[in-house]
Image (cartoon, rainbow, N blue to C red):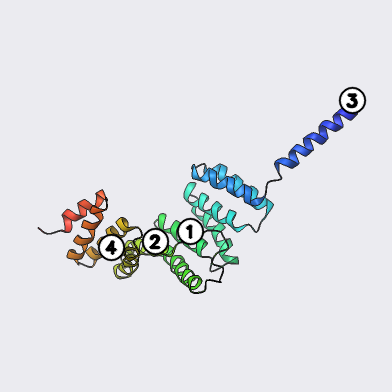
């Protein structure tokens, strides 16, 4: 009987060991799949497990920060995770961009801008030196994503001239065309350049933006 009990105990122990044998990366991947389906709390549990396996696994910190701030509306807790990454990797493009994006989504536009400006500077430096490792978070951010987000945030703080600079870049690169035209139209309208605003809203309508049609009626003269 004792032998059987011992064998059962060993079997349970081995099962428990096998259940916890997943790597930090595997737990993080599970968390990402849960996040894709908006299962935020379960995703965070997976990121927690990833960090238990490897406290230095920065991808889990970044994704957990995003899940907390965007999924659970726990802004400060999410930002704390991201800041802990930036404490170690201050020029990490992905983390800087995500932090700026989160602040912007929470209507904290002035707080978003320094992170996005720094992300753009770091991205340009990485592109200028292709041998330089760009990011420690496995997040690859296209430079036009940063230009677009900067354009959006500058529109929101009514710094229209700076917004136009970044949105022109997006339009030239055919990135976020419909929304870039709309936002640039807003910026031109803010500068009282109604002809340019009309042209951009018209282009946004052509690209399928329903809301732009209202702006087109407002700013386009007969």
In this picture, is 185 found above or below 25?
Answer: below
Could you give the CA–CA distance between mark 4 and mark 2, rounded to whole angstroms? 12 Å
Name the element at disc 4.
helix
Residue that protrudes farthest toward the front in the picture: 130
At x 51%, y 55%, the residue is 76
Q: Which residue is mark 4?
A: 184
Name the element at disc 2.
helix
Q: Earlier in the sequence, mark 3 or mark 1?
A: 3
Could you give the CA–CA distance between mark 4 and mark 1, rounded to whole angstroms? 23 Å
Q: Earlier in the sequence, mark 1 or mark 2?
A: 1
Q: Which residue is mark 3?
A: 1
Q: Earlier in the sequence, mark 4 or mark 2?
A: 2
Res. 98 mark = 1
Marks 4 and 3 close (CB-CB < 8 Å): no
Q: Which residue is mark 2?
A: 149
Could you give the CA–CA distance between mark 3 and mark 1, rounded to whole angstroms? 58 Å
222 vs 106, nearest the viewer: 222
**Residue 108 appears anywhere in the view:** yes
At x 50%, y 65%, the residue is 93
Q: Earlier in the sequence, mark 3 or mark 2?
A: 3
Residue 119's spot in the image, x, y percent? 47, 67
């Amino acid at each position: 009987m004792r032998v059987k009990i011992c064998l059962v105990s060993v079997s349970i122990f081995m099962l428990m060991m096998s259940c916890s044998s997943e790597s930090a990366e595997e737990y993080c991947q599970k968390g990402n799949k849960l996040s894709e389906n908006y299962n935020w709390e379960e995703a965070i549990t997976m990121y927690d497990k990833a960090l238990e396996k490897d406290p230095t696994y920065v991808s889990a910190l970044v994704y957990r920060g995003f899940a907390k701030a965007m999924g659970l509306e726990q802004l400060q807790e999410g930002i704390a995770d991201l800041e802990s990454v930036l404490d170690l990797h201050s020029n990490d493009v992905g983390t800087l961009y995500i932090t700026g994006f989160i602040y912007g989504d929470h209507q904290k536009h002035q707080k978003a801008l320094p992170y996005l400006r720094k992300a753009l500077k770091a991205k340009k430096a990485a592109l200028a030196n292709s041998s330089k490792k760009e990011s420690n978070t496995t997040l690859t951010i296209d430079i036009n994503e940063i230009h677009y987000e900067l354009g959006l945030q500058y529109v929101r703080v009514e710094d229209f001239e700076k917004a136009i600079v970044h949105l022109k870049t997006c339009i030239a690169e055919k990135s976020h065309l419909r929304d870039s035209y709309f936002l640039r139209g807003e910026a031109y309208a803010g500068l009282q350049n109604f002809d340019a605003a009309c042209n951009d809203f018209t282009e946004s309508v052509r690209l399928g933006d329903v809301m732009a049609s209202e702006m087109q009626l407002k700013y386009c003269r007969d």
